[in-house]
Amino acid sequence: MQHIGARTRERMASDREVAAFADCGLALAGSSLARAGFNFYRPTPDMRQLLVCTGGRGEVWLDGRWRDLTAGEAYYTPAGVPHAYRAKARGLWSLCWLTYPAAAPRAPRFAPRAPVVLPLNPRPLALAVEGLCEAVAHRAPQSERELWTRLLHQHMQAALAPATAQDPRLAALWSAVDADLAHPWTLAELAQRAGLNRESFRRACLAETGRSPLREVAHRRLRRAADLLRHTPDKVAAIGQRVGFSDPFAFSVAFKRAWSRSPRAYREEG
């Protein structure tokens, strides 16, 4: 059961409009000014969602009962677990929200496995959602939409892992990798730089990023390539070499696999 209600007003951006959503695993981002009639019940949701209250008061289903959700609180719901939320009979309930498909490989890794209410400063996320929706509404270039998307994803990660600090060994390693993406990084060298054996390093990397070590390196290379394509006049082949691809064809194939478009098409859309 999903009812928006005749008096509710919504704004949203989808993965059809924002190319960078694919990099973060996002499907939708939006905001709702909800009134009576706004009522959602999903017995077997096929997506993960963070619903953030920015004002007013509504109700969410948690631990077998309804409870109020007010400004400064967020309702996180995982895939496959029933959830529900609704506006009250009177008053305005202001929300912003992000959804990730259940199978999105790049969705946040530190997500709870059952619906939960979290304390959250709603303003940064709400401003980022508003900025993205404005960018889409005014046909801003994909490069601008990508900046808003990164903010959204970062806020989502922080909301779901407030007590999970990044491993300082990995933080130092990834800083070194980002500083020299053209270097031919190997698993052995990465593990040595992190001060871990290969298996411990692989597990730590999977837990923190959701990717194997070499896939994380590739992800960082292609993310940097996307930035360079949008913000520099450098030739495609030169950008590929700069981020560690000596073969222009291999760079084009890898980039298209990650961004669903060729490097040239990605640049033209910017």
Image (spheres, rainbow, N blue to C red):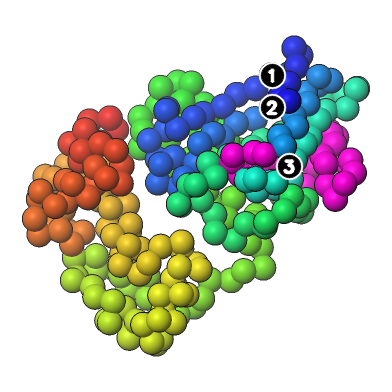
Q: Quadrant of the C terminus?
A: top left
Which mark is drawn over residue 32?
2
Labels 1 and 2 touching (C-beta < 8 A): yes
- The amino acid type of the residue labelled 3 equals Pro
Q: Quadrant of residue 199?
A: bottom left
Residue 108 can be seen, yes or no: yes
Which one is closest to the eye, mark 3 or mark 1? Answer: 3
Helix, strand or loop at label 1? It is strand
Q: Residue at x 60, y 31 (%)?
A: 30
Q: CA distance from mark 2 to mark 3?
A: 21 Å
Task: Give the camera-side residue of 189 and 137.
Answer: 189
- Residue under label 1: 9
Task: Give the camera-side residue of 86 and 70.
Answer: 86
Task: Give the camera-side residue of 215 and 118.
Answer: 215
Above or below, 228 against 204 in this view is above
Residue 253 rendering spot, x and y as whole percentages: 18, 46
Residue 152 can be seen, yes or no: no
Above or below, 122 against 217 in this view is above
Residue 214 rendering spot, x and y as whole percentages: 30, 67
> For the residue carrying disc 3, how many other residues have a C-alpha within 10 Å: few (<14), some (14-19), or many (20+)?
some
Query: Does label 2 or label 3 sit earlier along the sequence?
Result: 2
Q: Residue at x 38, y 87 (%)?
A: 197
Q: CA distance from mark 1 to mark 2?
A: 6 Å
Above or below, 68 against 245 in this view is above
Horizontal placement of 93 versus 186: left or right? right
Q: Which residues are magenta?
A: 44-73
Residue 210 rendering spot, x and y as whole percentages: 46, 61
Which mark is drawn over residue 82?
3
